[in-house]
């Protein structure tokens, strides 16, 4: 078998190898090359889909805690490559190669003291689900998210850390099996979609339907009219009025660039990175806007409409 229960870390030596995710022993060449076993590797498409923006500054700060004297000698060149990449002044938007290198490094028994530092690095780079898997706080089973009658419904395998996160969300409800969905599920008000998003990507990295459900939750909130409050002492309360909704997004021209301002939306970010090559886009952290070359205006408008609604602009 490619993966079996790992021997004691105290007897494995520096060269002993274990899957960085499930910590079972690696015995075949392919698994050793990757640093993970075949079953865990099947989760790659899910856990390596970056869904939140990276904080490179936090990642660099984490690497400053790294004790190079504790690194297994055979992995030191790769560790130095990781530090160079994270410390680059103009890093790439795609950190998957770096994450793969970290997984390979951590598969060596002798590098277990580095695990906490590199977990913080991976979390800061935006791969929160993968970091949670390493910490034992994420479920490997599949979870699904839907939006029903203005509530986000999450159905997934039992997970203690996920339950703790869900209980902290205002307005949450737990539904036993067959009362709302075939299996037990949690539901949350549409207004809490940001908290639900973070809880799901962190504790259920193998999910489906999340982005679409968040879009549906936002559409539901936009469709609910805002009622003017009753003023004390008035003879008659004013009629319910819908407060005009400000445009969600904007595009401003800045020479050869377009500056795109929009609320955080994981689906839009993923579409932007998939559609527009890295050399034609960048995140302006100071202004909190995406900048793309002006020749992509039509594509950007189409993506904004898709992910924020027809009235986005």
Image (cartoon, rainbow, N blue to C red):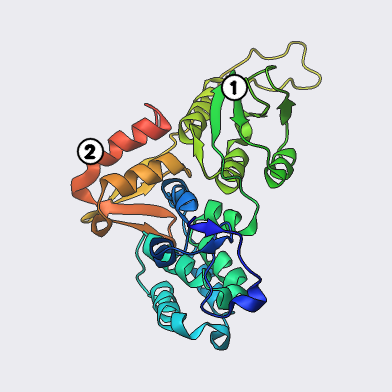
Mark 1 Cα-neighbour bin, 10 Å: few <14, some 14–19, many ≥20:
some
Residue drawn 51% across and 29% down? Answer: 213
Answer with mark 1 or mark 2, whichever residue precedes in sequence.
1
Locate residue 146: give its quadrant.
Answer: top right
Residue depth check, mark 1 versus mark 2: number of the one nearer the observer: 1
- Rendering coords of residue 68 (x, y %): 53, 86
- Say left or right for 23 vs 94: right
Give percent across and percent down for residue 66.
56, 80
- Residues at circles 1 and 2 in contact by the CB criterion of under 8 Å: no
Q: Is residue 45 visible?
A: yes
- Between 92 and 137, the one lying in front of the other is 137
Q: CA distance from mark 1 to mark 2?
A: 31 Å
The residue shown at (75%, 39%) is 167
How far across and down, in percent of the image, does residue 6 sit?
Answer: 60, 64
| Quadrant holding the C terminus | top left
Q: Seen from this angle, which residue lies furthest front?
A: 1
Q: What is the total number of numbered labels drawn onto the structure image?
A: 2
User: Which mark identifies residue 150?
Assistant: 1
Q: Nearer the viewer, residue 168 or 75?
A: 75
Q: Is residue 210 above or below residue 198?
A: above
Viewer-proximal residue among 88 and 68: 68
Residue at x 58% of width, y 54% of height = 133
Task: Quadrant for residue 90, please give it.
Answer: bottom left
Task: Look at mark 2 in the image and give the residue it sits on.
Answer: 298
Q: Is residue 109 left or right of residue 180?
A: left
Residue 181 higher or lower than 286, as above or below: above
Q: Residues within 10 Å of mark 2 (few under 14, many from 20)?
A: few
Secondary element at tag 1: loop
């Amino acid at each position: 078998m490619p993966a079996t229960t790992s021997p004691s870390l105290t007897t494995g030596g520096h060269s002993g190898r274990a899957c960085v995710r499930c910590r079972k022993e690696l015995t075949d060449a392919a698994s050793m090359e990757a640093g993970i076993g075949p079953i865990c590797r099947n989760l790659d498409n899910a856990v390596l889909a970056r869904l939140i923006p990276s904080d490179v500054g936090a990642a660099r700060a984490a690497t400053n805690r790294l004790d190079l004297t504790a690194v297994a000698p055979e992995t030191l060149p790769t560790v130095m490559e990781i530090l160079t990449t994270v410390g680059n002044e103009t890093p790439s938007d795609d950190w998957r190669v770096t994450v793969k290198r970290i997984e390979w490094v951590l598969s060596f028994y002798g590098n277990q003291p580095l695990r906490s530092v590199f977990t913080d690095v991976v979390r800061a780079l935006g791969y929160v689900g993968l970091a949670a898997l390493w910490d034992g706080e994420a479920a490997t089973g599949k979870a699904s998210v839907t939006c029903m009658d203005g509530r986000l419904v999450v159905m997934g395998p039992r997970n203690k850390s996920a339950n703790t996160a869900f209980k902290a969300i205002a307005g949450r409800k737990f539904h036993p099996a067959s009362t709302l969905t075939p299996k037990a599920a949690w539901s949350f008000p549409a207004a809490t979609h940001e908290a639900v998003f973070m809880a799901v990507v962190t504790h259920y990295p193998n999910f489906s339907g999340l982005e679409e459900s968040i879009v549906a939750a936002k559409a539901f909130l936009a469709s609910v009219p805002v009622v003017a409050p009753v003023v004390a002492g008035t003879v008659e309360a004013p009629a319910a009025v819908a407060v005009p909704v400000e445009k969600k997004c904007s595009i401003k021209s800045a020479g050869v660039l377009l500056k795109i301002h929009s609320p955080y939306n994981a689906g839009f970010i993923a579409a932007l990175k998939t559609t527009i090559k890295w050399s034609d886009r960048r995140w302006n952290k100071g202004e909190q806007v995406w900048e793309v070359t002006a020749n992509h205006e039509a594509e950007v408008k189409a993506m904004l409409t898709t992910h924020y609604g027809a009235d986005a602009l």
